[in-house]
Image (spheres, grey):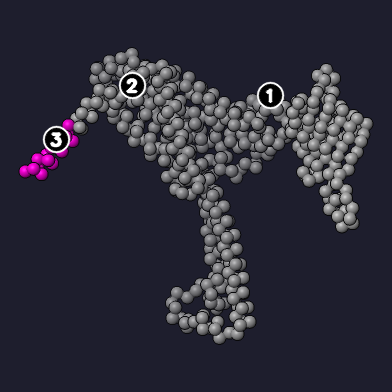
């Protein structure tokens, strides 16, 4: 028992050191990817460092569910690859210890990690996502920090494009300015050119003041031109020359946070219980909408006959109503009446079609809402289960290839994770577009990778030379010999 206890501690110790290292590396890589995707939301906004640190903290927590399976795959590959490369795995097997017994302490540890990953996705991640997206929306609304470059158009001021040819760094004087003001629409744009100018912020930091010197402005008077057309006058534009002119532009530089309550009804901000409750509530609304649509179609005489007022649904037994020949009834009408009846029928059909289209859109919104919540609910389980699958892929694969270090394990891990990501993304899109049921789409990657993990574990436990070319060559020769023998028997039977 002491030997097994020391063995468990030794294997677990080797794994944990590598695991924490790879987990940190994976979090850093995924965090950099997330920052690259959100670079336009944070760069050039002039926000305080504490806001940026808060953004990084929430972003780091957001990438943990994706970094965890990749870190487990890489750590298990490196751990068992190192044991195989140092022949420690061979020594353990020679002592009668099976691969499953060697993997047992890590299997128990990974099982706890899977449970912890689920509770993290269910309890911590929704609150993190709520605050993260509220912060992202706040940063998007933040006006950019004013830094007008030279030699190019600057579009950081909403409704304006500013071009500056030269800028004196010491005095801040801008020279040879050209300003396009399209805040009232492109059809009513104003172009202003000036020899020089300065930029100031008002005391309350809510407005930008442009003080221009020695210039002229051209205003497109398209509205006046349209009115002048009636009086046979032509007023294409207005020209104004000035020695000094001041423009006051709305440019609020203060950072204001979005209220986090705007994210309360979003699927990313709910735990499993709240997701189920929301799905049930919307399902009830969808059924009520479907029932109302059916009732409106029946009450609106959509099916042709005018049912009696006290009858809620059409009669099931056709013998209750006399047969009615529509063609003969229409033919008995005169031409004017027939045309009026046909037009009324067409108008009624179009009205019903519009009603059905509207109800279809409403039902589609309900179904899309339910699918989003169902996808988020299944994701909480699939990401946790992926940790277990990647362990049973990485550990036996490391025992088979017997290569430690960061070379081969990183290459194999990246390839496996790309395969997982492609399959998982394909399943997500199939579920999102309602091509597949939500649970099938979200569990697609698990259904594909689980048999691979079982196969690799079996091959590693039976000491199969999965990546040994000689083994595959012998297998090829064996299959080829069987095929030749079978063909020879077929020829003999035909000749005999």
Q: Nearer the viewer, residue 114 or 431?
A: 431
Q: Which residue is mark 1?
A: 49
Q: Residue at x 82, y 20 (%)?
A: 168
Tell me the crowding category of disc 1: few under 14, some 14 to 19, or many 20 or more residues within 10 angstroms, Cα based.
few
Element marked by disc 3? helix
Q: Nearer the viewer, residue 105 or 361?
A: 361
Q: Is residue 283 left or right of residue 224?
A: left
Q: Which residues are magenta?
A: 481-496
Residue 401's mark? 2
Q: Residue at x 83, y 22 (%)?
A: 172
Residue 485's mark? 3
Main structural element of the magenta stretch: helix, strand or loop?
Answer: helix
Rounded to the nearest angstrom, the CA distance separating label 2 from label 1 is 47 Å
Q: Is residue 489 above or below residue 433?
A: above
Res. 428 visible in picture = yes
Is residue 482 located in the magenta-colored stretch of the structure? yes
Rounded to the nearest angstrom, the CA distance separating label 1 from label 3 is 77 Å
Quadrant housing residue 293: bottom right
Q: Residue at x 46, y 40 (%)?
A: 426
Q: CB under 8 Å between callouts 2 and 1?
A: no
């Amino acid at each position: 028992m002491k030997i097994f206890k020391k063995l468990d501690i030794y294997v677990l110790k080797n794994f944990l050191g590598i695991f924490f290292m790879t987990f940190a590396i994976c979090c850093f890589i995924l965090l950099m990817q997330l920052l690259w995707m959100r670079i336009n939301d944070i760069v050039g906004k002039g926000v305080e460092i504490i806001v940026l640190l808060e953004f990084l903290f929430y972003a780091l927590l957001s990438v943990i569910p994706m970094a965890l399976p990749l870190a487990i795959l890489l750590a298990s590959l490196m751990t068992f690859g190192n044991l195989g490369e140092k022949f420690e795995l061979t020594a353990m097997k020679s002592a009668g210890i099976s691969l499953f017994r060697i993997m047992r302490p890590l299997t128990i540890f990974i099982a706890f990690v899977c449970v912890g990953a689920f509770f993290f996705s269910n309890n911590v991640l929704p609150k993190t996502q709520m605050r993260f997206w509220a912060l992202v929306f706040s940063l998007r609304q933040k006006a950019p920090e004013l830094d007008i470059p030279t030699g190019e158009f600057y579009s950081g001021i909403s409704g304006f494009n500013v071009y500056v040819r030269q800028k004196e760094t010491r005095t801040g004087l801008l020279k040879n300015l050209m300003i396009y003001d399209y805040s009232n629409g492109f059809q009513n744009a104003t172009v202003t050119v000036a020899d020089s100018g300065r930029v100031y912020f008002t005391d309350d930091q809510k407005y930008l003041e442009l003080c221009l010197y020695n210039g002229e402005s051209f205003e497109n008077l398209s509205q006046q031109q349209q009115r002048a057309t009636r009086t046979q006058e032509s007023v294409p534009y207005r020209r104004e020359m000035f020695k000094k002119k001041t423009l006051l532009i709305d440019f609020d530089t203060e950072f204001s946070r979005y209220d986090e309550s705007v994210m309360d009804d979003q699927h990313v901000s709910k735990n499993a219980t709240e997701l189920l409750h929301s799905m049930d509530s919307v399902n009830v609304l969808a059924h009520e909408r479907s029932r109302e649509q059916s009732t409106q179609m029946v009450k609106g005489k959509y099916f042709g006959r005018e049912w009696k007022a006290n009858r809620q649904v059409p009669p099931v037994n056709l013998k209750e109503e006399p047969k009615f020949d529509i063609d003969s009834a229409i033919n008995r009408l005169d031409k004017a009446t027939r045309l009026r009846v046909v037009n009324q029928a067409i108008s009624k059909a179009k009205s019903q079609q519009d009603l059905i289209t509207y109800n279809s859109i409403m039902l589609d919104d309900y179904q899309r809402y339910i699918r989003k919540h169902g996808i988020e609910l299944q994701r909480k389980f699939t990401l946790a289960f992926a940790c277990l699958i990647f362990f049973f892929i990485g550990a036996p694969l490391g025992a088979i290839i017997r290569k430690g270090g960061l070379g081969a394990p990183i290459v194999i891990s990246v390839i496996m994770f790309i395969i997982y990501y492609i399959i998982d993304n394909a399943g997500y899109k199939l579920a999102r577009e309602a091509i597949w049921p939500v649970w099938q789409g979200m569990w697609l990657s698990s259904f594909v990778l689980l048999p691979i993990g079982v196969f690799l574990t079996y091959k590693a436990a039976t000491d199969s030379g999965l990546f040994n070319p000689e083994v595959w060559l012998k297998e090829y020769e064996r299959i080829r010999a069987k095929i030749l023998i079978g063909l020879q028997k077929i020829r003999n039977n035909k000749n005999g």
